[in-house]
Image (cartoon, helix red, strand yellow):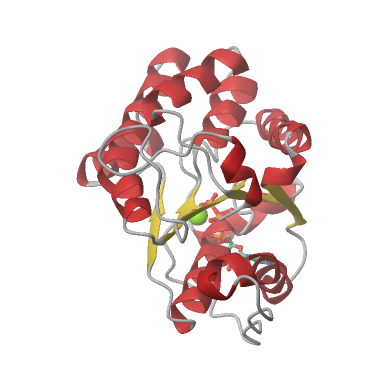
Amino acid sequence: MAAHAARRPRVGGRGYGDRVSTAAFLLVLEGGEGAGKSTLAAGVVDWARSHGRAVTATREPGGTPLGERIRDLLLDRAGSPSPRAEALLYAADRAEHVAAVLRPALAAGELVVCDRFADSSVAYQGAGRTLDAAEVAGLSRWATGGLVPDLTVLLDLDPAVGLARAGRRGPADRLESESLEFHRRVREEFRALAAAEPGRYLVLDAAESPERLLAMVTGRLARTVAHPAAAAGPAVPVSPAVSASPGAPR
Ligand SMILES: Nc1ncnc2c1ncn2[C@@H]1O[C@H](COP(=O)(O)OP(=O)(O)OP(=O)(O)O)[C@@H](O)[C@H]1O
Ligand SMILES: [Mg+2]
């Protein structure tokens, strides 16, 4: 587990405030549309499993039956909830996700790889929709009971590039259809969040190849994540290949 974990209250197990196993690790992937989060998540999951690590791969919105229904509401181009209603829907999704998926997996000592988490709300509902960022962050803190990722990988990319990538995949969803200016504010907010807590973020240039991005993440995770018991020993070698599955969840 990351060294910073000792300084903050980790939450897990049945009751909020319980400590999780020292092997538990919450890795979050953040970034704008088409930045490569799902591709990288698939690569990290394959890498960790190939090292015998128990992994839960999940995403927001979604990740639970209720969450997948909320996801449909949120991404449907036909609907356009008001900004506060949208923020509350994301928070409801997150509360369910934390309770039903993240906490149980962390309590079991797993590596949890989560495609988007609380920072996406601050970036999209805060900076994007121009709600108060501190209020949006507070909503997530309440929804999660204060669960904080051990490491957040921010895939930083010019939104024009990310949107073009996402556009090649299919028709734009409701958020992808927002203006370039909206997506620029989102990018800047992600960067500001990372800059405020550099020890808890790994900021990567998402214009790099999937293979290099994966190597950078696994390099950072090798000791603590792949073989936590061997944290004091030599680093675990990085897998040479990426399995960037085209069918990865998005
Ligand atoms: N590092 C990369 N360089 C170039 N293309 C990439 C890279 N990573 C992913 N891609 C491609 O870009 C597209 C978007 O990738 P992916 O779905 O992983 O992004 P995402 O961040 O999960 O997107 P979304 O925000 O829509 O969920 C895919 O077609 C993927 O193959
Ligand atoms: Mg995705």
* Residue 80 x/y as whole percent: 40, 23
Of 43 and 55, nearer the camera is: 55
Q: In the drawing, does residue 214 fall left or right of residue 107? A: right
* Residue 202 x/y as whole percent: 72, 52
Ligand 1 visible in quadrant: bottom right
Q: In the drawing, does residue 22 fall left or right of residue 231? A: left
Seen in the picture, residue 3 relative to 54 is either above or below; the reply is above
Instruction: Please name the residue shown 69% across and 36% down the image.
Output: 190
* Residue 16 x/y as whole percent: 34, 32
Quadrant containing the N terminus in the rendered view? bottom right
Of 14 and 59, nearer the camera is: 14
Q: Residue furthest left?
A: 65
Instruction: Please name the residue shown 44% across and 66% down the image.
Output: 248
Quadrant of the image occupied by residue 167: bottom right
Instruction: Please name the residue shown 69% across and 81% down the image.
Output: 234
* Residue 236 x/y as whole percent: 63, 81
Q: Is residue 28 visible?
A: yes
Quadrant of the image occupied by residue 98: top left
User: Count the marks: how many?
Assistant: 0
Seen in the picture, residue 22 relative to 224 is either above or below; the reply is above
Q: In the drawing, does residue 180 fall left or right of residue 43? A: right
Of 219 and 38, nearer the camera is: 219
Quadrant containing the C terminus in the rendered view? bottom left
Seen in the picture, residue 183 relative to 26 is either above or below; the reply is above
Q: Is residue 163 visible?
A: no
Seen in the picture, residue 17 relative to 245 is either above or below; the reply is above
Instruction: Please name the residue shown 53% across and 80% down the image.
Output: 243
